[in-house]
Image (cartoon, rainbow, N blue to C red):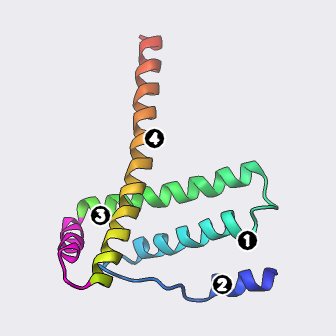
Amino acid sequence: MFKKHREFLNSKSNFINLVNIERKDILDKIHKNYRLTYLKDIAIARFIEENTVKVINQLIYLNNVDINHYFIVNKESIKTLLQMIKSQNLREKEDAIKFLSELNQIARELVKFITLYTYLSDAIEDIIL
């Protein structure tokens, strides 16, 4: 059983590079998130403790912060994806929608955290001052 998981993690996934991601570290973080999610949800889901899940989730979250920031700074990538949605090529359109949906999901998770952080910061400031 574990051999299949090792083979899966060592194999190249069906990664579709819709936009040119110029920074190798961002591309690596995308691949790491894919593998971490696979490990957490499939390969070792029955064997890991709650604290280990929290660590994996934190690693995924930190990678998502960098990935999201990359696309905020590189607006041309988003424009390219939006142009793909207008395309007549249905496969390209579908891939672009899926990618934008994934970016949107990452952004929503980050907003939840920022909202909580802002609330806690304000509450602590009220207590201190």
Q: Earlier in the sequence, mark 2 or mark 3?
A: 2
- The residue to which callout 4 is attached is 113
> Which quadrant of the rendered structure holds the N terminus?
bottom right
- Local secondary structure at mark 3: helix
Amino acid at the residue labelled 2: Phe
- The residue to which callout 3 is attached is 71
Q: Earlier in the sequence, mark 4 or mark 2?
A: 2
- Locate residue 103, reporting x and y percent: 37, 61
Q: Determine whether label 2 and label 3 are within 8 Å by CB.
A: no
Q: Residue at image x 47%, y 19%?
A: 124
Give the mark toward the camera: 4 or 1: 1
Q: In this orientation, which residue lies closer to the viewer: 55 or 78?
A: 78
Q: Is 83 part of what is drawn in magenta?
A: yes
Check disc 4: other Cα within 10 Å, few if <14, some if 14-19, many if 20+: few
- The residue to which callout 1 is attached is 43
Check disc 3: other Cα within 10 Å, few if <14, some if 14-19, many if 20+: some
> Which quadrant of the rendered structure holds the C terminus?
top left
* Separation of marks 3 and 1 at Cα, in angstroms: 30 Å
Amino acid at the residue labelled 3: Phe
Q: In this orientation, which residue lies closer to the viewer: 106 or 121?
A: 106
- Local secondary structure at mark 2: helix
Q: Earlier in the sequence, mark 1 or mark 2?
A: 2
Q: Earlier in the sequence, mark 3 or mark 4?
A: 3
Q: Residue at image x 45%, y 59%?
A: 64
- The residue to which callout 2 is attached is 8
* Separation of marks 4 and 2 at Cα, in angstroms: 32 Å
- Locate residue 10, reporting x and y percent: 64, 86
